[in-house]
Image: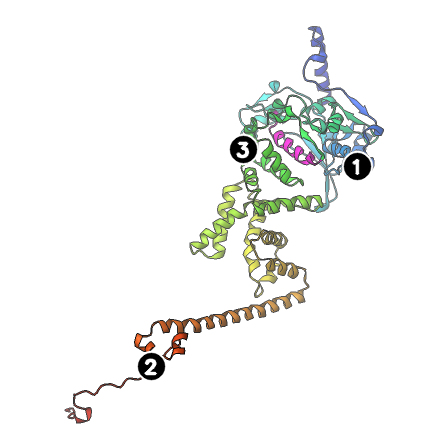
Amino acid sequence: MAYFGFIWTSMIKDFMNRLMGKNPSKVGPDFGTEKRIAASVHGINPKELDERALQVVSALQDKGFEAYVVGGAVRDLLLGLAPKDFDVATNATPEQVKACFRRAFIIGKRFRIVHVVFGRGREHDVIEVSTFRAHLESSKAKKVSGNEKTSKHALAHVSHAVDASGRVLRDNVWGPQEEDAARRDFTINAMYYDPSSGELVDYHKGIQDAKKKVIRMIGEPAARYTEDPVRIIRAIRFAAKLSPLGFKLESKTAAPLKKMIGLLADVPQSRMFDEMLKLLQTGHAMASIEQLKLHGLASGVYPLMDMVVSKSSEPFVRQALDDTDRRVREQKSVASSFLLASVLWSDVRQAWNDRMQQRQALYPALQDAIDEVFNTNIGDVSGRGKLGADMREIWSLQPRFEKRTGSSPLSLIEQPRFRAAFDFMRLRVQSGELDAELGEWWEAFSLSEPEERVQMLEAFRLEHQRAQSQTAKAKAVVKRVVDPLKQSTLQAPEDHAQMGPSQASLGAPAKRRRRRKPKSDATPDAALPPAST
């Protein structure tokens, strides 16, 4: 109903414009020109499409709705890349989409979308389905004085709202496909692929920009950044991802980035935290940092992101970022807790050492250091949940790797976060913070069978005892050598005069002659009278 209501409103506006002598084609924003490109021209291989996305599109089309694969997946398929996610766009409302699938959930307030879930547990996959959105002018939206948190009551049951700066807080008014395309950020992300016909629908010359290797904002860039400041970060992310293919931000798209960075301060911290992780965990962390520096955004984006940029030249942090990129390329899982623990480790280590120098016990000193660094840099953003707990555990387990006696190694290897803590310790080895032998021993220990682990512990115990014994013997030898030397320097001059030449030259101790007591004139004891009783 909302969709047809919008069409009716548009028809009334069009009629009024004609009545007033205005050319409808020149009134309002430019929605582009629809172009349908055949499969023989665009070259997308349908075999590269995700089977679950095809099922969602097919189910919606079978119900009489329009449905397309849209956004980054189409862009990547066009460029010969493997898409990470497949999104679907349709003219069905969220409620209508939900009714088409057994496991579908409507989520979001700012943008209401539907998650269609396939599979269960950790192996589940999600296809995100969005409804075509209408193009609405911010000047006609409801004005809200606060933000998402402070204006929850004012935003209740509101479909379109902006804050004082023009940032969109609610955008849930449905419209036709050409207006939905105009609402998207970059031309290369605003193409729609229809699997049933093989056609590609393009309104804003996205295919041409893809061939030119240009990342161009749809509409006037400054206004689009004002509507949603997070587009500043998205521009950096796409520039980083596509830079190996030769893509660059269009000059008009890049020009406002630096001067509009202040708008990011109004974005909710939780959303900024998520956007920061996207910059660092999509396989282009170092490229993203270089793009931030290139466009004058090395600081002022987000406090924690600013710290990552400033520490990116440190060997330990650089290795963590490179390792994250490598794991993404190898399609392995990455943990934000591991990466953030790596970025903040130098601060934890410094605070830990400071407390140890104040004679605080090892483990209490580490826990106090963790609390200080964590509260200073993470705060309440995702920090009281699993991410914060994982970071703390990775740090807390580090001292235990240096203890290889008793049953400590056996209990450590059974810890739930052992693997993350072990990988973290291995990074410390690679950066030169710990000896390579320690990393090699734990690598072998972790891969050994239980019986072999017991043997390794016994071998280390014997080796440790031998080392301690040799150290004790060495100290004893040093003491025997040093003490006579000290004694020789304390000899009286006349004693040296009595030494032989070899003894004097070697500094050997001289034998002391017993001197007889001189005879006293006093009466001997035997001559003394007996004591009176």
Q: Main SS of the magenta segment?
A: helix
Q: Secondary structure at mark 3?
A: loop
**Label 1 sits on what residue type?**
Leu
> Which residue has dot 1 on it?
49
Q: Badge 3 local density, few (<14 within 10 Å), some, or many (20+)?
A: some
Magenta region: 227-244
> Which residue has dot 3 on it?
300
**Label 3 sits on what residue type?**
Gly
**Label 2 sits on what residue type?**
Arg
**508 left or right, relative to 415:** left
Q: Secondary structure at mark 1?
A: loop
**9 left or right, relative to 266:** right
Residue 296 percent coordinates (x, y): 57, 31
State which quadrant residue 291 falls in. top right
Q: Residue furthest front?
A: 501
Pointer 3 or 1: first along the chain:
1
Taking 515 as reference, is 381 above or below it? above
Q: Kindly identify the residue that appears in the image at 56 percent across and 24 percent down.
A: 163
